[in-house]
Each structure stands twice: as C-alpha cells, then as structure tokens.
Image (cartoon, rainbow, N blue to C red):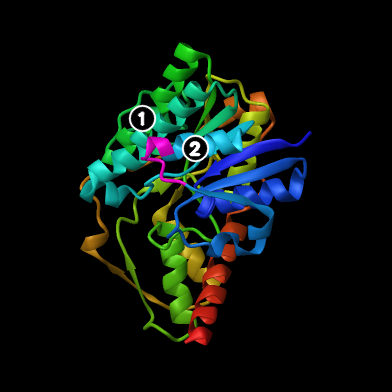
Amino acid sequence: MKKRALITGITGFAGSHLAEFLLENYPNIEIFGISRWRSPKDNILKILDKLTLFECDLTDFNSVLETLKSSKPDYIFHLAAQSFVPTSWRMPVYTFNANVIAQINLFEAVRILGLDPTIQIACSSEEYGLVLESEIPIKETNPLRPLSPYAVSKVAQDYMGYQYFQSYGMKIVRTRGFNHTGPRRGEVFVVSNFAKQLALIKLGYAPPVIKVGNLDAVRDFTDVRDMVRAYYLAVSRGKPGEVYNVASGKGYSIREVLDRLIRISGLDVKVERDPKRERPSDVMRLVGDYSKFHKDTGWKPEIDFDTTLKDTFNYWVEKLQVVVKKR
C-alpha cells in the first residue's frame, strides 16, 4: 500500500526539491501538496501531473482541517513559512501568523482528526542567534538566543513541536536546518542574490557592479538537495520528540561565497556596499554540528559547495535567458 506524504510549501524552494526527491527515489509514496491559488507553480511544472495539490491557507483552520481530512497523510513535511529574516523586521505580525499560527492550525487539525502521521517541522539555525566563539560548532544543546522576529517565531515552532510530542504523543521530529541554497532559491537570499546579479552582468543586462551587505558574517551552507534528503531521513529514521541540526559543519564568510561565485562566473566586477542590505542586528557566526543526526539516520552532506554555487549561477543564467526570450 502506498504511503501518503503532505508537503506544505510544495511550490517553494525546498518543497519543490523534496517533491522531486521523493518521486525519484520513493515511488511507493503518493505526494500531496498545499498551495495557494496565487502561488507560482514554476518550480513544480515538470512534476505537476504527478502531484495532488490542495488549495489551502494554513492560517485558516477550517481550510487546514478539510485538507487533512482529504489527504490523510502518513508523513507531513511542514516547510511553508515566512523565511526571509529582513522581512520579519518589517512585518513581525505577518511572520508570526505565517509561522506560528499556521503550525498551531496544522497540529490541532491532526489532533482533532485523530491522525497519526510522522511530522517533520523545518526549524532554523537562526534560533541560536547570539553564539559565542567557544560554542562553535553549535550542538542542539546550545542555548537559543534569537536575534530577529523570524528567529523568535522559529523558536516558538520548535518548542511547540516538543510540547505536542510530550502532551499528545504526536510523532514530531524537529530539524534545525542551517543555511541551505541551490537552484530555485529566492533571489532575496544571499547566494541566490549574488548569483542573479552576476548572471545579469554575464548576459550583458547590468553593469559590472555587485551590491552587497555585510560580508563578514560566517554561515554554514548545505545544498538544498542534501537538505531535502535529510528531511526524508528525519521522518523515516529520526526519533520523534528529538531535535536535529542539519548542517555541513563548515563555515564560509559571505565574502568568500562572493569571491567563489565571481570566480565561477569568470567576470571582472566591482563590489559596492549597500546600506539597505544591512540588518538591525545580525548573527555573525553560525556553523553546525550534525553528528547527532548522522548517528541516528546516517545522513551526511554529499554535494560539494562549489557544485552548489555553480548550479545556482547556471540556474539564474538559464532563467534570465528564458525571461528575455519571452519578451
């Protein structure tokens, strides 16, 4: 009998890669997804005929209830979120609605309907926030000192997952994903933003100038295709109630990321600081220890970082060429 997996945020970056991963590797899993009528379907166009989509607003409880009644999932991958840190400063209430209230609705619908899925919730390394140098690499036991409204909303999601596991015995696995990137990443995120700027220059659509924010922050980057493999292992091999870091264990300064992308592009560009790209407060160093997750599931990153950067740059070159042809 086929298992049924429900992916919230299936039209997004990680959600679309997860759907592809499951289709390619687990034909015994039927895939359902939640989307909004206005959600762009570009990321899933090639697999749309293999999916069952439900129009659902996660902040509307009745909408969530009806979707779960129909889909009756064995697995839920809860990836939908307002995930851009700068937006959370401008729109903290929206961020909490999209992240915290939406998850309450999801958990309550599962509980009320008496369903028993294994649920993976996508938490974040941003929860660690202010990390001391002596705490690197970061373990799951590290104190959480969030430094943005987004990070606080993710702490709430994280602890809510623990609470529903303890209170109701719901099979919830929390993954604290460190930065993940790759093809299809939204252009507001740093690697994708640099890659798009370079692609525009490469194609002759922009002058040879790159706009940047803080280049000194250090981040741990995992390829999205490794990340979604981790999501599946979290529900198939992870222990309900546990929290797991998903990371590469390597730190790269944003300056080094930019230098690598410039080298991959083969361009000679000028770098300019843009104050608009600065945050009110920023996490300076996030590097994760994924040994707990590796011990329980066998997961480890497999895709080289330069491959990730090259694939991201090529994605933007191809995407922008298509956009221009359509004009």
Crowd rating for badge 2 (residues with CA inside 10 Å; few <14, some 14–19, many 20+): some
Closest to the camera, between mark 2 and mark 1, is: 2
Q: Position of residue 118 (x, y in %)?
A: 60, 27
Tell me which residue sits at (65%, 42%) in the image: 229
Q: Magenta: predominant secondary structure element?
A: loop
Which of these two is toward me, 249 or 163? 163
Q: Position of residue 89 (x, y in %)?
A: 23, 47
Q: Position of residue 164 (x, y in %)?
A: 45, 19
Question: Which residue is identified by label 1?
Answer: 155
Tell me which residue sits at (49%, 37%) in the image: 66
Residue 297 inside the magenta-drawn segment: no
Find residue 273 and report its image quarter. Answer: bottom left
Question: Which residue is identified by label 2?
Answer: 66
Question: Can you say whether 311 is above or below 285 in the image?
Answer: below
Q: Is residue 140 visible?
A: yes
Q: Is residue 239 left or right of residue 11?
A: right
Give, as a single range, the part of the protein colored magenta.
56-62
Crowd rating for badge 1 (residues with CA inside 10 Å; few <14, some 14–19, many 20+): many
Quadrant of the frame with the N terminus? top right
